[in-house]
Amino acid sequence: MRCPASLLLIASLFTANLALAASASVDINLTPAGSFKGKTADVKGFATLKGDEVSAQNIVVNLQSLKTGIELRDKHTLKHLDVAKFPQAVLLMGKGKGGKGVGKIRIRGIEKPIEGTYKINGNELNAEFKLSLKDFNITGIKYMGVGVEDQVSLQVAVPVKKGP
């Protein structure tokens, strides 16, 4: 089935490669029924903790590494993300305090503000936010009568470094 793992890329934006393994996943709901999860660990960058504030810049996700668990669905996802033209998703900037955060993300060449929640567990930041596929010109995904819902939920785990 075709699926917008493009949201995975967004989730990946909060991810990094340090001592901890970075990861991102996206929950994609299908209509009329069903769902699946897309995942990647090919993320570069990290978050910085300064006092009670968190920030991140230029977290890069290699969209070509997204996996959904089904090879044909992976191919359709990469096609909808247009990875030949846009191989990366980038969290340009993110900041948060008190478990809530805002940022700016670029997917398929389109920059949009995002907001969500996060928790810090040891040296890892876990973030979650929702995105609209339409905001990134990802529409009309349907295969054999099953379509992808517009809103997706992204979860990301990234290493956190303590700032000065």
Image (spheres, rainbow, N blue to C red):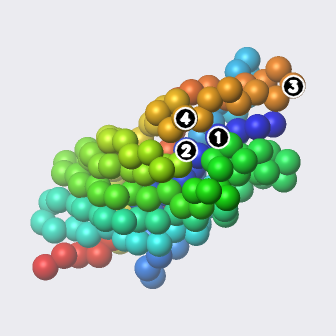
Label 1: few (<14), some (14–19) or many (≥20) C-alpha neighbours in 10 Å: many
Dividing the picture into quadrants, the one containing residue 149 is top right
Q: Which numbered disc, 4 or 3, marks the residue closer to the eye?
A: 4
Residue bearing mark 4? 137
Q: Considering the numbered disc 3 on the image, is that residue within a helix, a strand or a loop?
A: loop
**Of the residues under marks 2 and 3, which one precedes in the sequence?**
2
Tag 1: amino acid:
Pro
**Of the residues under marks 4 and 3, which one precedes in the sequence?**
4
Tag 2: amino acid:
Leu
- 26 and 91: which one is in front? 91
Residue bearing mark 3? 144
Label 2: few (<14), some (14–19) or many (≥20) C-alpha neighbours in 10 Å: many
Label 3: few (<14), some (14–19) or many (≥20) C-alpha neighbours in 10 Å: few
Assign the C terminus to one quadrant of the image: bottom left
**Relative vertical location of residue 66 with respect to residue 115 in this rendering, above or below:** below
Label annotation for residue 7:
2
**Of the residues under marks 1 and 4, which one precedes in the sequence?**
1
